[in-house]
Amino acid sequence: MDKVRIAVIGAGVVGLSTAVCIVESIPNCSVTVIAEKFTPNTTSDIAAGILSPHFSPETPIHCQKRWFGDTFAHVLSIGQSADAPIIGVEFLSGWEIFKEPPKERFPFWSDMVLGFRTMTDVELRRFTGAKFGWMYTTLICECISYLPWLEKRLKDAGGQLQAAKIQDFWELDGQYDIIVNCCGIGAKALTGDPKIHPVRGQVHKVHAPWLKHFIRTDDGRSYIYPGISSVVVGGTRQNDDWRMSVDPFDSKDIFERCCALEPTLKHSSKLFEAVGLRPARAVLRLEKEKLERRGRQMCLVHNYGHGGAGVSFHWGTAKEAAELVKDFVIEMRPTGKYSKSKL
Amino acid sequence: MDQWRNTEWSTEHIMLLSRNESLEEEFERAKAAVESDTEFWDKMQVEWEEMARRNWLAGSQPPEKAAISPHEKGYYFHTDNPFRDWPNAFEEATKKQKEGDLPNAVLLLESAILQDPHDAEAWQYLGTTQAENENEQSAIVALQRCLELQSYNLVALMALAVSLTNTGLQQDACDALKNWIRHNPKYKYLIRGKTGSPAPGRKKDREASASSLLTEVKGLFLEAVRQTPDMIDPDLQTGLGVLFNLSGEYDRAVDAFNCALTIRPQDYLLWNRLGATLANGDRSEEAVEAYQRALEIQPGFIRSRYNLGITCINLGAYREAVSNFLIALNLQRKSRSTQFCHRVISGSIWSALRIALSLMEQPEFFQAANVGDLDTLMRAFNMD
C-alpha cells in the first residue's frame, strides 16, 4: 500500500509535537503540518512555557498524571543535555503562594516535579497576605526556541510544513487520509465545538536578569517566570474575551500586581507585551471521530482544549494522539497487515 | 567467544553462559566505578551519544550509518531506572530473563550498558529481550549497537534478521542473514570473496535487487543444508524459516521451524516462530497450539502472548483476544520502574487491544483503552 497521508492542523506546541510523534512512530506515512501561523506567531510563543499542570479538575486526574508525567520525562531529558538552552529548556525553581491553604496540600503532580515541599514561615513572610505556599523545581520550555527545534526534528524525519488557513475539514478530502486537529482556539470555528472557549492572557516580557525564581499566585492570575533570556510577567485570565490587542489597563494592573510580589521589577526594562488566547475546555479533547458526507468518510483525531497547560501536557497528549492515528492506519491497511504475527 | 556461541548451543545454554569475568573482577570493577569521579560523566556520555544518534539535537550531524541498516535511531533509555547503579546488573538481568520477568530484565540490561556502553553482550541481550517483550524498534536499535561493537555476533545477527522481517524490511533482513553465513565458521566458505550487495539505486532497482538478494541468500542457506546432510543445525533451519517467511512460502517455513524443534524441543522462541508462521499462513488453529507450547515453557513471554491475542482476533474470539492482551500488559506493568511505568509498555499491544475491543463492539471500554487505564479494563474483564 502507498503511504498513508496525514495532515496535522496547527503548528503550535501541540500540533508540532503530535506531528513529530506520528512521523517517528508510524512507518510508511507522510506528515504535513498545515497552519495559518507558525512560530514565532503562535499562541504557544506567548506562553511562558512552565511545566506545572494547573488544569480543569473535570479532566480525569489519571489522564493528567500520564500526560504530565510523559511530558516531564521528555523535557527533563532535554534539560539534562548540553543543548538545553538552544532548545529552550531550563530548570526553574520557585514559589507558588496561596491566600488560603488549599484543600489538597499535595497536588497530584507533587511527586513528579523535583524537590516539592511546602514553604516555611520565613519564606512566606516575604509575600504580603500569603498564608501557605509550595516550593518546587520544574522545567521551563520556551516555545520561541523549542518550536523551531521541533520543526527541524519533523523535517529531518521527512515531515513537511504548509501555510494555509483551513476553514472546513472537507477542504482536505482526497488529499489526506487522516486529519489531526491540533488547532487550539481555532477548533472553535473549525469544529463548532461549543465547549471550547478562549481564556485571554496578556503578558509583559521584561529584562530583569537578577530574577532567578518563579513566583505564581494560587489563582493563576499573577506570575513571574524568569526564562532563558527574558522574564515573563503576567497575566490575565479573561473568560470568553477574544481581544488580541494589548489592553493598557491590563498592562498597568499586571505590572502593579507583580511589583507587589516582586518589588525589584520596578527596575526592569520592558521588552514587549503580547496577548494569547488559551484554548480552554473543561475536558481536553483527545479522541477519534469519523465524519461522513455524500458517501465519503473522513478520519479525524482531535487533540485540543489544553487551556493553559499546552506546554505541560504537549508530549503526553502527542504520544496518545499518535496512537489514535495508528489505529486508523491499521484499519486502512489490508486486513492481513494488522493481524500479522511476529516471529 | 565467537566459537563459544556456536550453533550447537541452544538459547538456554547461551543464557547460562557466564562471562569470562570472575566475581573478584566484577567486584573490583563495580568498586572502581563507584569510586571514580568520572563515572557520572561517562554515563552522561553514553546518554549523550544516544541522543546524538537520534539526530534531533539542533545542529548535530547524523552519525555515520552502520552498514547493517538504513533505519538508524537512538536507543531510548528509561529515565527512572531503579537499578541504575546496580553491581552485577548483567547477571541479574539474565536471571530475570530466565524467570520470564522481561520488564525488569530490560531495566537491568540498560543499567549494565550505562555502566559499560561497550558491552556488546549486554546490547545483544537487551535486543533479544526487547523482542520477547514485544518492543521491536528498541530490539532493532539494541541489536544494531551490538553488531557495531561485534560484527560477528551470530545470535545478534539472527535476532536482527527476525526483527527486521517482522518490521517488513526484507532487504535489511536478508543482509543480516547473509552476514550470519559470512561470519559463521561452519558456512563462511560458501561466500567466496563475494562482495556485499550493490548499493541501492532508484526505487525500481531497489525492489529488483531486494528480490534477487532474497533469492541469493535463500540459495546460500539451502546450499549450507545440502552440504551437511547428516546433521540438523537448528540455527540454520531458523534462518531458513525466516527466509521462507520473507518470500511468503509459509508451509516451507513451518517445515524448517519444525525441523529445528526436533533438536530443541524446549526452545520457546522457536515455538513462537512456528506459531507466527502458521498464523501468517492462515493456519490459526495450529498456531494457537504452538503459542500455547511457547507459553507453557515461558509464561512471561510477552510477544507470544501478543501473538496469541492476534490469532484469537483472526479466529473471531475477541474476548479471549482481549484477555491475552490484558495479561501481556499487566506483565509489562510489573516492572520496578514506578514513576513512569507505562513507558515499559509497548504501543503495539495497546493498539491490538483497541482493535479487539472495537470488534467486540463494546464502546464503553474505548475510553479506558484510549487513555491506557489498565485497572478499569482488568476489572471489567474479571482479571483483577
Image: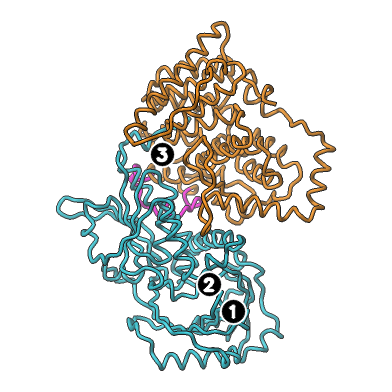
Residue B304 pos. (x, y %): 51, 32
**Mark 2 vs 1: CB contact within 8 A:** yes
Residue B58 pos. (x, y %): 51, 59
Q: Callout 3: few (<14), some (14-19), or many (20+) C-alpha neighbours within 10 Å?
A: some
Q: Mark 1 points at which residue?
A: A214
Q: Separation of disc 3 and disc 2 at Cα? A: 44 Å
Q: What residue type is labelled 1?
A: Phe
Judge whether B38 appears above or below B200 on screen. Answer: below
Image quadrant holding the N terminus of chain B, namely top right
Which region shows up in magenta? B357-377
Residue under disc 3 on the same chain as residue under disc 2: no
- The colour style of the image is by chain
Q: Nearer the viewer, residue B23 or B367?
A: B23
Q: State the mark number for residue A151.
A: none
Which of the two discs, 2 and 1, labels the residue nearer the N terminus? 2
Chain containing the residue with disc 3: B
SS at badge 2: loop
Q: Is residue A69 visible?
A: yes
Judge whether B157 appears above or below A237 on screen. Answer: above
Chain the render paints orange: B
Q: Name the residue under label 3.
A: B319
Q: Main secondary structure of the magenta part?
A: helix
SS at badge 1: strand
Q: Separation of disc 1 and disc 3 at Cα? A: 51 Å
Q: Which amino acid does label 2 sit on?
A: Ile
**Residue sitting at 62 percent across and 65 percent down?**
A111
Chain the render paints cyan: A
Q: Callout 1: few (<14), some (14-19), or many (20+) C-alpha neighbours within 10 Å?
A: many
SS at badge 3: helix
Q: Name the residue under label 2.
A: A50
